Image (cartoon, rainbow, N blue to C red):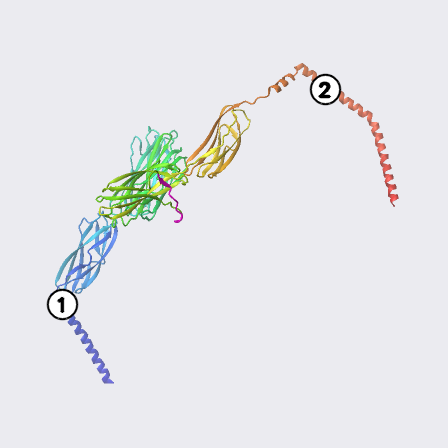
Amino acid sequence: MMRKKLFQKVMAVVMMLSVILGQTVVGLADDFSDNGSPKIIVGGDTVFEVVAEGNNRISFQIKNKGGAAADNVYISPKRSATDPFRVSVQGGGDVGSIGANGYKNVSLNVDVNGEVKESSYPITLEFTYRNTNDSSFSSSETIYLKMKGFDKEPSFKLENMKLSPESMSPGNSANLSGKVLNNGTQEMVDVTVSLDNLSTDKISLSGGFSSKHYASIPVGGSVEFAFPLVASADMAAGNYPVSIKLKFKDGFGKAVEKAQEFYVNVGGVAGQKSQLEMRNMREPSGVYGVNENFTVSFDLYNSGKVAAKNIVVTAEAVDTSAVVPKSGSVKTVSELAPGATTSLSFTFAGTAASKSQNYAIQFTTEYTSGGTAVTTFKQFAGVNVSNPDSEEENASKPKLIVSNYVCDPLIVMAGEEFDLNMDILNTHAQKGVKNIKMFLTLAEETSSETEKSGNIFTPVESSNTFYFDAIGPKGTAQKQLRLYVVPEAQPKTYTLTVNFEYEDSAGKEFTAKELLGINVKQVTELQVDEFAIPDTVEMYSPITVSFGYYNTGKVTLSNVMVKVEGDVECQNKNTYIGNLESGAGEYFETTFTPNSGGEVPVNIVISYEDATGELKEERREFILNVMEPMMPEDMEGEMDSATPPMDMKKAMIAIALLALFGMGMFVFIRRQKQEPQSRFAESLNDDMDEDDDDDEDDREDMSL
């Protein structure tokens, strides 16, 4: 037993000596192989993408390409003093040891803090290290930082714009306030809000600072501002533009300057004007692909003191080749009362010519204020369009687009013809196209893909297919079409698809589609029966008016109302009917009484709104000759002849009194004479009653 334990101890010591001797041999082999020369390099790709704002981290490998181990490896990044970023090694520059053909992972922190360019910046990585013989070595490698993120555009909008009070009198002041909302994808830094287009003889600042400064506005954040204004004492009444200017830096440090106008009403009571504003702008969120519809809507509000009339709102993309309307691009409002609001919406879609970026939509509003002054203002909205094929797959593809189109008339009437003029553009700068076929189709959008209507538009005296020989690079071809709208077309905006089939110079075939919005309006017609009222009437004499009216058009008439206008007394001067379907009819009857004499104008007005919301009227105008009420002539003659002289009246009164006295005496004497007879008659009646009682008793006895 003792021998066995001793044997185990000896074997353990032998194994430990074997391990120690083996490690010593391996270490010596490493120290003296390949002359002991390590070499540090950057392994793999040397170009790294970083976002051109904020903090970034990039990771890569450093490799020991030499045949000996590298000890005390230290990495030091070097950059130009003008580079708009700072670079540091994650965890410090000490990397440690790397064996022969070994590697380690390294991370760099890149903090972009200046204005960058869309390019690549070189960074030199300097390495120092030693081998196991304590010999010093150094090497360097260059990597490149490629900036990305330049496709983001800063975006903001002004909200809650308000002038208090709403109108300034000449020589008086008001406070202009509002809010800047950062609705983009980048932080707005070093923001300055100021007013421009001011002058001492018009609108100027009334004390205070001429600008407001804010350190930053984060994405989704907002800041408020206010400026005191004063109007010159000798200003004429009207609306005067004040430019609200914003200066800031975007997330890349790039300086941006933008401005937007706000109209200030000057005039006080004598110069009251209408003031239209776009409120609650609802921009499309998300990203929209090619030919994918998106809608921009807002509320048009009249903050002025009088009605705005003849309002025309036009919507169009700033880049008309990339974004096209799919609804009517022009909408009209005949009148908007003070304090009233109407909602408007426009539908657009990106085309194959668009790129993956944000596109601006411009809304221009024109209206008449105060009867003669025409006021114009603009506002913008934005939408993100995605077209990944535009820059890569289609980089060399010649493209045909409808760069411009005009409908004459602008709003097409159902059942009538109209002219459609198009400009067809080859967008390619070097390649031409040939053998071009163009044809039109209509796919009306409904709630179901299986419910598609037939053609709404039919070419007049031509086929539906058209041919062009060729269009050169950046060339344009014009096409004028005469189209007919079917009478049954419902009033709305239809999407007309223009299809292209063409070839390039090598005979390669291509296809393209363009979408045009055609605004169709249906005929509205209200037929009213003929009726008349008497030309001459007496004051306070009632007049009854009755008639029938019928919707002989093809669309429903909304908000039908019958009004009686004039100086007459009427129980219901305004009678609301409601909607009147196509082919339906109603009967109306009312009674009114003239209140004054002479010529009294009276109007019977039937008003309604068509499918587009336009207010229309059917009027019947009359002139009443109202006479004073008169008494009949024969009655006047009888009254005159029956009126006796004053002396005769007195005599007749005396005779009447004597007659009444004599009649009274006669009645008194007659009653005195009849009184005994009355008493006798009473006694006689009593005896007769007793006899009747006796007879009744006898009858009872007989019955017994």
Bounds of the magenta span?
447-459
Question: In the rendered image, which residue does mark 1 sit on?
Answer: 31
Quarter of the image for residue 666 reads: top right
In the displayed structure, 35 sits above or below 456; it is: below
- Which residue is painted at 87% across and 39% down in the image? 695
Mark yes or no: residue 281 visible.
no
Q: Main structural element of the magenta stretch: helix, strand or loop?
A: loop
Question: In the rendered image, which residue does mark 2 sit on?
Answer: 657
Mark yes or no: residue 145 visible.
yes
> Cα distance, mark 2 to mark 1?
166 Å
Is 455 in the magenta?
Answer: yes
Q: x and y percent of residue 281 in the render?
A: 36, 42
Foreground of the two, 475 or 482: 482
Quadrant occupied by the N terminus? bottom left
Q: Which mark is residue 589?
A: none
Q: x and y percent of residue 19 in the render?
A: 19, 74
The amino acid beneath tag 2 is: Leu
Asked whether, in this view, residue 444 is left or right of residue 143, the answer is right
Q: x and y percent of residue 703 in the render?
A: 87, 44
Quarter of the image for residue 34 reads: bottom left
Name the secondary structure under disc 1.
helix
Q: x and y percent of residue 201 in the render?
A: 30, 30
